[in-house]
Amino acid sequence: MDYQRAIDWADDRIVEDSRLVILTFLVLTGVFAAGLGGISTEAGTQQFTTGLPAEEALTAIDQEFSTPFGVDTGSTQLIQRGGNVLSQENMLRMLRSQEVMDDITALRVTGTSSPAGIVAQQLDPAATDLEAQINAVEDATAGDIDRAVRRAADSSPRFASSLSNDFNRGSASASATIGVVTHEVPAGISSGAGQGGSSPLTDIQQRTVTAISGVSDGSITVFGSGILAQEFTTVITDSLLIVVPAAVIFIVFFLIIAYRDLMDLLLGLLALFMTIIWTFGFMGLAGIPFSQMLIAVPPLLLAVGIDFGIHAVNRYREEQVKGISPGPAMKITTDQLLVAFFIVTGTTVIGFLANLSSSLAPIRDFGIVASIGIVFTFLTFGVFLPAAKVELDRTRERYPIPTFSRTPLGAEGSRLGSVLRIGVTIGNRIPVIFLVLVLVGSASVGVYATGVDTSFEQEDFLPPEDNPDFLQELPEPFAPNEYTVTGLLNFLEDNFESTQSSQATIFVEGRLQRDSALEELHRAGEDPPNTFLESSGRAESTSIVTVVQNYAEQDPEFRQLIDRNDRNDNGIPDDNLGTIYDELLDSPVRDSALSYITEDRRTTRLVYTLEADADPGAVVGDAQQVADRLRFTAIATGQVVVFQQVADLILESAIISLALALLGAALFLLFVYRWLEGYATLGLANLVPVLVTVTLIAGSMRYVGIPLNAITASILAITIGLGVDYSVHITHRFVDERDEHDLYTALDRTVRGTGGALMGSMFTTVFGIGVLALALFPAIGQFGVLTGLSIVFAFLTSLLVLPPTLVLWDAAINGGSSVRALLFPWVTVATPDGDRESKEDWEWAGDGE
């Protein structure tokens, strides 16, 4: 296929039908703008856990062992701090807050509990409702309350677990406590491992904040999944309000330096605006929700768009300074740059689409949206911007529109041009030695990078505990909200014994009425693995077996039934399990039993307590080891297990997407350079600086302590896409120049012309994308830092590593004498035109043109 015919057709449409092109793009912008209203948001950790086997098992547990009447329960925590929470005054605040909530129908309260209520019932055993509990505490003396607190600590394990770790039984004091209010909500609220960006409890808990403010005196904080979901969503909006304007400020500043012309600047910004509108409009039309990961998409599109725009304008100016009129100058520009833009777009899209290999839906969505956005960037900057630029300059010829500058960046004789030539000098003097050192160094960094950590934590999606002071000084609407969730989570972790994250659950399916079923469940806890908490040689656990044992201690008749069916006298029945289950489900402990076994006796769960410092990676293996002991279908689950599975998938995703991106980019470059230039090996030369960039960014991650997490997992594949962007521009320009000039003149002209545009693009995009570090949750900030670093590395390797690589490629193409000249530079060598001269005579061959 003669690609030049297609390029010539595109050149003609851009230049000859510029107004039609502009109108078409404006109409399409209106179409995509209509999709903006359809964008929804998705936040939190739940989006990453959906679909995992362990998460599906955890969801099944929530569904199987909850009430079957179409409703579910959710809870609100009332965290009380300040002074002694067991004093009469503070306990009355807690009880009155519970009473206020219980009286509001809209809060759908089904029950309340708190240490204050337990103390009240110690004071008056008949105080079963909140009003009676308040009266009991009001009528008690300080001594009565202290004695009641000590009795509560002795008789109720739940009492101490709801008090802070500094609870002192002797002085009847503690600095913090947690009350719990249970609400009736639509079914499904409790399912799943992670936290989502929406919750039926959000409205309830917002109302609760207002409701108790009058009686809590500011000492009680409302907390729960609804508040957490609200902050998950709010932090996206706040981050965009900070990141986008900051990016615009930096971008405009550097574009002013790069373009040095007001009208060119406005055209570049219009093209950027259109790219964002098209991409977000596509999301709305396609029904792809906006998640935390997608906050990175606009800066990425700005990075590539700015690069395209600066190259287009700079290359166009290189022709204009020769006195060529706008139409022909733009045809020369697009004739060259459309090919380069096509190569960059293809490799960048391959880099992003490599994320489709991930098992995590948000990473796949990111790959799709970023890829579509890059295609849109190619169209707006490769077609619309040149057409608008031609029309602008034609209008300038008819009307007195001021022109501030037409000088390209990196012009010959400029200081910038001299700086950019460093890579040419290396290629001229010691290309082989330099590349050997670079490749050995990159290999060493790559080995070092294999130690980078992998993590998946809820904290990655939460705002900082305290917003930086400089952000608080921002005017409305840019000033971020005050966030409480992270501080509360840290407070709870520091002051209360955590139970949620210290359990592993085994979800079991099978015929649980067979005689050996309970014995088998009991034996699974013998000889526990290291991460399981051990008690008397067994794993500490709760299950249907513990329900049976506990009820047997309470009811003599049930105990006799167990004894009659216990063949080995270990307290675990071996026969007539159907009868035992029937008795259990007709007893007062029915609800407890149904929280561990279903009525059809085909599903149960075993809950094991973990060591406080258990490594999550080890927990997954140990929990599955225990599950494998059972002759039932058994799956290890629990939040620790689910989150660790996500972390493992993140690492797997990063490795697979990196491999696919490298393979895809290599094959694409080999094909496209063979097709366009006749040399497939140019694609390999093009990849050398990209590989160096990838190893540098991976090594930097380990060095600065940034892990591969849900957001940064895609950075290596993205680095390939962005790195190829820089190297393609130099390679493609070099090939064009090499057709007309000797080797070093071609390199010199390439680096002076394209290198200047690359430097302008680098500074603009680094600062534009670096503003992600201002985002209000850590993972996106880390992503911004890494992406900025990858752009810097891509720029440096393109200017320092690529020229020597192209020298070697050119020598290989031109035959053995050229290769010998590079390996033995102290002997006379043959120049590309066949003349023999000393190596010194080669230096700066382009200066005398």
Image (cartoon, rainbow, N blue to C red):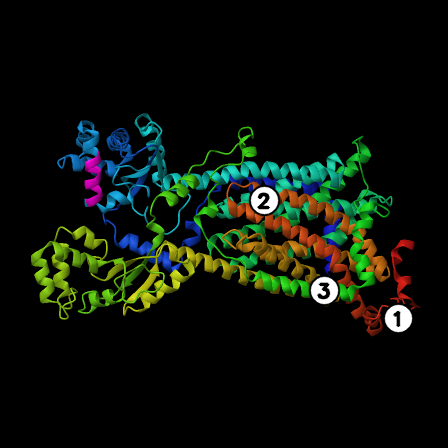
- The x, y position of residue 109, in whole percent, is 25, 37
Q: Residue furthest toward the top?
A: 214
| Residue 107 numbered tag | none
**In-image side of 457 versus 322 (left or right):** left
Q: 555 or 101, which is in the foreground? A: 555
Nearer to the camera, 628 or 141: 141
Q: What residue type is labelled 3?
A: Leu
Residue 251, position in %: x, y? 66, 40
User: Which residue was labeled with disc 2?
Assistant: 298
Q: Does the magenta stretch include residue 738?
A: no
**Marks 2 and 3: in contact by CB < 8 Å?**
no
Q: Say which residue label 1 marks.
A: 827
The residue that label 3 is drawn on is: 437
Q: Name the N-terminal-most of marks 1 and 2.
A: 2
Q: Distance between the residues labelled 3 and 2?
A: 37 Å
- In primary-sequence order, the first of circles 3 and 2 is 2
Q: At numbered mark 2, what does the secondary structure look like: helix, strand or loop?
A: helix
Which amino acid type is marked by label 2? Pro
The Cα–Cα distance between marks 1 and 2, rounded to whole angstroms, is 53 Å
**Residue 849 appears in the picture as rendered:** no
125 left or right of 648 in image:
left
